[in-house]
Amino acid sequence: MEKNQLNNKLMEAVAACNLGEVKEYIALGADVNYTTFEDSTEPNGYIQPTTPLRMVIFRLSDSLLTDHDLSQLKSIAEFLLLHKANPKPAIQIAEFRYGTYNPRWKKNTLKEIWEMIATATNR
């Protein structure tokens, strides 16, 4: 599979909350920092799910997600960050959708993922 196909498959796997496929595509060479298009080419680019980690944040707002899906998104975020995904684009979409990270938020999966990404920028 060519690199661009792998990257698109990675994005689809993240959107589907499928950790197994995310791991598979990264092992095959997909780029954890793949960008479907640059923010500058779209007026609202920074709020679009254009990177795998941004896709995680984008998917969190889906009210039809199951507890399993949320758990998968958390594991996907951990895996992407472990493999050096840039957290800054995800911060942009998270701040737009949920506001600035607040460590006093009630504990839930959104807070856990947001905290993981927010603290990753300090590494």
Image (cartoon, rainbow, N blue to C red):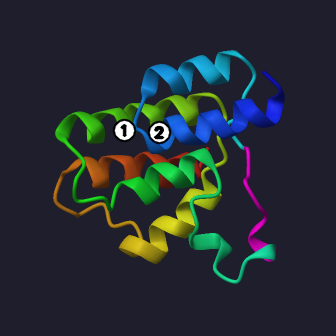
Q: Answer with left or right where residue 44 lies relative to residue 57.
A: right
Q: Is residue 31 visible?
A: no
Disc 1 residue type (three-letter): Lys
Between residue 41 and residue 89, name the one nearer to us: 41
Dots 1, 2 in contact, CB < 8 A = yes
How far from the left and from the top, in percent, is residue 113?
37, 47
Return the residue at label 1. 74
Q: Residue at x 30, y 54 (%)?
A: 110
Please tell me whether mark 2 sits on a helix, a strand or a loop.
helix
Query: Magenta part mainly helix, strand or loop?
Result: loop
Q: Answer with left or right where residue 73 lies relative to residue 5.
A: left
Q: Is residue 16 above or below residue 30?
A: below
How far from the left and from the top, in percent, is residue 108?
20, 50
Return the residue at label 2. 77
Q: Residue at x 70, y 83 (%)?
A: 43
Q: Residue at x 28, y 38 (%)?
A: 69
